Amino acid sequence: MGTDNNGDLLLPSGGYRRLKSFQLAQLIYDITVHFVKLYIPKESRTCDQMVQAARSGVQNIAEGSVDAATSAKLELNLYNVARASLEELKLDYEDYLRQQGELLWSKEEFLYTEFVKRRISCKKEFREFIVWAESHTSVPLRTVPYKSVLVANSTLLLIETASYFLKRQIQRKAAEFLENGGFAERMYQQRNKKRQDH
């Protein structure tokens, strides 16, 4: 089994800000902080739970990326924790819609297809979509603000995309681990090489 990066003991780590999963998780976190301020009662435990789940997604991707230098196992575990946190947040948004008597967008829904087509990855693009969606839909009488329905459904699609990218990261890192081994294996190989050289 060969070592990666010309036999370097430490594998590349950090650089999480370039990861699509991190960028989307951070966007989801920012949207969620704003969402709960506007639409979730402050005294509700759901308010804090949603913010913490969104934050956990961001923090665990960042920490996992940094830990990649010495521990593939820890890196993979943290990416899985990030996925679990996003899944928890997904359920909260779904609960909000269900409890308000609102529907999740189906793949046939024109708002769904428009959102996917735009490949939204920043707050500016997200806001532009919400404004567009408000002007392109007829709004029947509702007991909740229509914007909250748009934001909740749109955020669910962002969560789905972030989870997809995280799953790909996990699969790629698992394959790299099988190919290159872990930190302990690389250290053992380096020690053996040093003994042989001397």
Image (cartoon, helix red, strand yellow):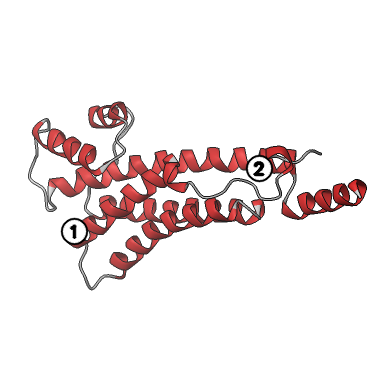
Assess disc 1: are there few (<14), some (14-19) or many (≥20) residues with their C-alpha within 10 Å of its C-alpha: some
Badge 1 amino acid: Tyr
The crowding category of the residue bearing disc 2, from other C-alpha atoms within 10 Å (few below 14, some 14 to 19, many at least 20), is some
The amino acid on which the numbered mark 2 sits, given as a three-letter code, is Ala
Disc 2: which residue:
174
* Residue 151 spot, x, y in % from top left: 22, 46
Work out whether residue 133 or residue 103 is closer to the camera in this orientation and state it. Answer: 133
Count up the numbered dots: 2
- In the image, residue 186 sits, relative to residue 140, either above or below, namely below
- Residue 189 numbered mark, or none: none
135 on left or right of 127: left
Q: Quadrant of the N terminus?
A: top right
What is the CA distance from the residue labelled 1 to the residue labelled 2?
40 Å
The front one of 42 and 186 is: 186
Question: Badge 1 is on which residue?
Answer: 39
The structure residue drawn at horizontal position 37% and vertical position 44%, both measured from the top left corner, is 24
Q: Is residue 109 above or below residue 178?
A: above
Q: Which x, y percent locates residue 79?
A: 53, 51
Q: Badges 1 and 2: C-beta atoms under 8 Å apart?
A: no
Residue drawn at 84 percent across, 53 percent down: 191
Looking at the image, residue 124 sits to the left or right of residue 1; the answer is left
Secondary structure found at label 1: helix
The structure residue drawn at horizontal position 11% and vertical position 48%, both measured from the top left corner, is: 142
Q: Nearer the viewer, residue 130 or 102?
A: 130
